[in-house]
Amino acid sequence: MSQAVELLSELVRRPSQNPMGRPISEPDYYESAVTDFLEGLFRSWGVRYERQPVTARRDNIVAYLPGSASQPTYVWEAHQDTVPALGMTVEPFAAHIENGRLYGRGACDVKGGLAAMLAAFHQLLNEPIERRCSIILACIVDEEYTFTGIRAFTSQPIRAEGAIVAEPTQLRIITAHKGIVRWRIHTHGRSCHSSQPEAGVNAIYRMARVVSAIENYAAWLSSHRRHNTLGPATLSVGRIEGGISANIVPERCTIELDRRILPDEDVESVPDELAGYLLQHLGPESWDQEKPWMVLPPLDAEGKDKLVARLRQAAEQVIGWAETGSVAYGTDASTLQAAGIPCVVFGPGDIAQAHTADEWIELRQVEQAADILYRFALIR
Ligand SMILES: [Zn+2]
């Protein structure tokens, strides 16, 4: 068994489920089992590392590989968390291997990519220092829900010429993706007994007008704002909640929105832009919106030619091809890039197997990814 596959098995056997905002305290949740394993690994390899507390039981862990002073420094980033293992049809933490695939929660997203980075990092340790670049290996918490790990990591200055973020891209080099903003809108009314609805104000009726206006705005948005590779900007209402029972006129109703942003849009002004539209089309009805609970900037393809060329060259050496492109999902890469580090997304596995009931990854791709990353950092 190669070191990359061994490491992947060890990682999958250690649950690191993200509670996705729910108040869960069971030991199978949060990233600490994986963080402790990584700490043991870095200690046994004799490399400098630091644990960076983010929230309770959730630490980033960052390891440093010193390289030639005349060469660039690169960040390799992978997240430690997985989505919950609820409803899986395979044993989620057994790391079962069959027909060249390893099954389990996180195998594809993104413990396969993390294992490839770890194996490459360890292989580089055996090279003379002047034959390798400096690598900052950042193992980050909470990528699957609110991105608190990458924000904590980028809140400190990082000196690096480029970054590779592990996500399942099937070894394609991803240079762009959309950003995400999620926030809530509330309507307010006045409750009363439903036998005399005229005595109250129905917050659900008010929300119905807001939702209908949002549907029109979303249609306008998708037809007027479009990126040549990423497609249209979008807006979707994904959740609605209001009222207590059928015999009470509701006094409050809430919706949750998901807006996907293009690289030339301003993340900060997205909720205000919708508010302006609602004001214009509904007047100052009694609705209000909260500040977003989640903001992920878009990943822009500009300004990363050197990084892409270096990774392309390594990929061509190992698998005989290299392909760049964009993806529909958001990653930690855009937050790193917003901190001033040119960034691409790259890793083994297919996003189609991420978060699924029988999540798996092809082991050959994990090994190829490890070899590509090793060559990426090697100086010849
Ligand atoms: Zn992921």
Image (cartoon, rainbow, N blue to C red):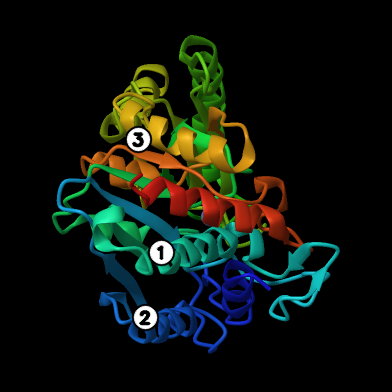
Q: Earlier in the sequence, mark 3 or mark 1?
A: 1
Q: On residue 307, which mark appears?
A: 3
Q: Residue at x 36, y 28 (%)?
A: 300
Quadrant in which residue 56 is drawn: bottom left
Q: Position of residue 126 (x, y in %)?
A: 38, 69
Judging from the image, what secondary structure is the residue with disc 2 in?
helix
Ligand 1 within 8 Å of disc 2? The answer is no
Helix, strand or loop under label 3: helix
Of 199 and 288, nearer the camera is 288
Q: Is residue 90 above or below residue 355?
A: below
Position above or below: 122 against 254: below
Mark 1 CB near ligand 1 (8 Å cut): no
Where residue 224 appears, as percent x and y from the top left, is 48, 10
The quadrant where residue 319 appears:
top right
Q: Please name the residue shown 42% across and 79% down the image.
A: 38
Residue identified by numbered label 1 = 121
Q: Amino acid at mark 3?
A: Leu
Relative to 299, 229 lies left or right: right
Tell me, for residue 45, which label it has, or none: 2
User: Is the residue 164 above or below the residue 92 in the image?
Assistant: above
Give the residue type that dot 2 points to.
Trp
Q: State whether residue 126 is above or below residue 378.
A: below
Q: Amino acid at mark 1?
A: Phe
Mark 3: is the Cβ under 8 angstroms from ligand 1? no
Dot 1 falls on a residue whose secondary structure is helix
Cβ atoms at labels 3 and 1 below 8 Å apart = no
**Inter-mark Cα distance, 3 to 1:** 18 Å
> How many other residues sit within 10 Å of disc 2, few (<14), some (14-19) or many (≥20)?
few
